[in-house]
Amino acid sequence: MAAPMLRWCCPGRRFAFARVGCGSYHRRGPPTGSTSNGKRGQSSVAQQPHITAQKPRKGEREWAAVVGLEIHAQIASNSKLFSGSQVHFAAPPNSLVSFFDASLPGTLPVLNRRCVEAAVMTGLALDCHINRKSLFDRKHYFYADLPAGYQITQQRLPIAVNGSLAYSVSVGRKPSQMVTRTVRVKQIQLEQDSGKSLHDDLRSQTLIDLNRAGIGLLEVVLEPDMSCGEEAATAVRELQLILQALGTSQANMAEGQLRVDANISVHRPGEPLGVRTEVKNLNSARFLARAIDYEIQRQINELENGGEILNETRSFDYKLGFMPEPNLPPLLLYDSGSLPSGADPQQVINIDLLREQLPELPRVTRERLVRQYGMLPEHSCALLNEVGLLEFFQNVIKETRAEPKKVTSWVLNTFLGFLKQQNLAVSESPVTPSVLAELLDLLDKKAISSSAAKQVFEELWRNEGKTPAQIVAEKKLELLQDPEALEQLCRSTLAAHPHVVMDLKRGNPRAINKLIGLVRKATLGRADPTAIKEVLERQLSS
């Protein structure tokens, strides 16, 4: 059977770090949190225990938790998986629906080439085996926002299988105490998204929006190699960074572009695995961690109190629910060695060519930052975890003479701190990389003090359009450059505060800081603390 015709579609265009205390669980009161509302449909995964060596307190018996994930990522594509309808977030209801999306009789699916390429690139980035031949299936179930009564997916023979996802967690009190863990990737499959049901309780009615129906999804199934919520959330963050680096998905969880189902069970170490439950449709990494840990503790409490865990997922019978998709032939992929001679490049996909186009992945980027700039691993993680922050940092580096360590500190502490205070994205910052670079240059050549630089930054944040040099001149924040004037101010300060001088001579090392502060106050913060200390120590020893 011939390979399916492919449509051309332009694409739309971060190593996560977390501190975890996963491992064995012990009985205690239920934590705060909640679980998500259920979502129809699921694909089960076999569970394997992941147990750590944390010891229970005296009199307690330990539990081991098992967590697996099914992650649905919306593919970054201008059109849907099997139709030419456009994809736009928050478009007017039912404004982006083709005849095929509405499942009108006589319409046929046409596979979107961009979606296939996105699946292959994601599989390559996760070290998956790419199947040269994959199949499409119909998964039958009824729901009002699923017009056809089935979903086109890849259950029997997906496009990619047997990969791995490495993520890093901190296991101690210090962020630098990091270990790398790996979760197996069972499979990656292409499938359609459903529409959206909008429930109006006041009018007792449900409205259907089919804008989302047919949008291409990547379902990434992670084997249950995780043991707590924070591990799962960290793995999802790492996958999110990879998808964004590849450009295969924008993976914006707030817009529903990355949704997670978690399969969870608990058991005593050495005993058979417990009955699993499923927490579905989670679209926040932080809430994912809380929901998983809440469900783990709920199961432990239930079992400790003599109850039993019910399988609360909506299992789907493979034999009854799936059938081959009759309107789509097998999807055939090629490498350079198997590419048919004379094949139309627009109608075939070359795996080797896509492999060559893979960008630098987050893990490699972090390693490069540590090696190139001498920064701490946790700092490289922080730069990648905020969208646009790495690009901002690199642009500052290009335009300033300041040391990379100084730039890292300002970007991660001052700049990022201001962003979070006002809940802004990097792209919404009133301070540009070139402006911050100019400010750091003034600091680097000792034209202003560190405290003055903070004042200038605050002013830059409030008043767009002014340069750092203009603010320094207007507020007279430049450092005192007259050595004789500084000498005189230090003598006057020593003469005016003999009790502090006496305290210093009696062996109190903190007294010198008091004197430095008094001199800086007299200069309105325009004197360099290091220069003040040198002058004071010289005058005190003479």
Image (cartoon, rainbow, N blue to C red):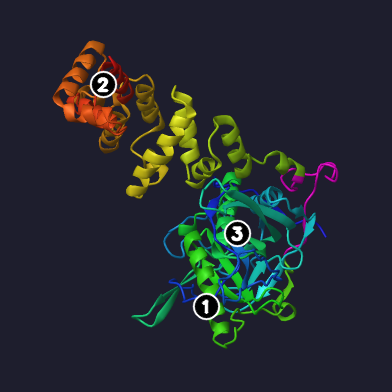
Distance from the alpha carbon under mark 3 to that under mark 1:
35 Å
Neighbours of disc 3 within 10 Å: few (<14), some (14-19), many (20+): many
Question: Is residue 330 found inside the magenta-colored segment of the image?
Answer: yes
In the image, which disc is placed on residue 478?
Answer: 2
* Residue at the spot 47% in from the left edge and 76% down from the top edge: 30
- Amino acid of disc 1: Arg
* Above or below 143: residue 261: above
Q: Position of residue 130 (x, y in %)?
A: 76, 53
Circle 3 or circle 1, nearest the eye: 1
Q: Position of residue 59 (x, y in %)?
A: 57, 77
Determine the residue located farthest toward the front in the rendered image. Answer: 506
* Residue at the spot 66% in from the left edge and 66% down from the top edge: 51
Circle 3 or circle 2, nearest the eye: 2
In the rendered structure, which segment of residues is drawn in magenta?
328-351
Q: Main secondary structure of the magenta part?
A: loop
Neighbours of disc 2 within 10 Å: few (<14), some (14-19), many (20+): many
- Amino acid of disc 2: Glu
**Residues at badges 3 and 2 in contact (C-beta under 8 Å)?**
no
Name which quarter of the figure residue 372 lies in.
Answer: top right
* Residue at the spot 53% in from the left edge and 74% down from the top edge: 297
Determine the residue located farthest toward the left in the rendered image. Answer: 496
* Residue at the spot 52% in from the left edge and 55% down from the top edge: 87
* Secondary element at tag 1: helix
**Residues at badges 2 and 1 in contact (C-beta under 8 Å)?**
no
- Amino acid of disc 3: Gly
**Is residue 226 something that shows in the picture?**
yes
List the residue tagged with mark 1. 298
In the image, which disc is placed on residue 216?
Answer: 3
Distance from the alpha carbon under mark 3 to that under mark 2:
57 Å
In the rendered view of the protein, which quadrant contains the N terminus?
A: bottom right
Neighbours of disc 1 within 10 Å: few (<14), some (14-19), many (20+): some
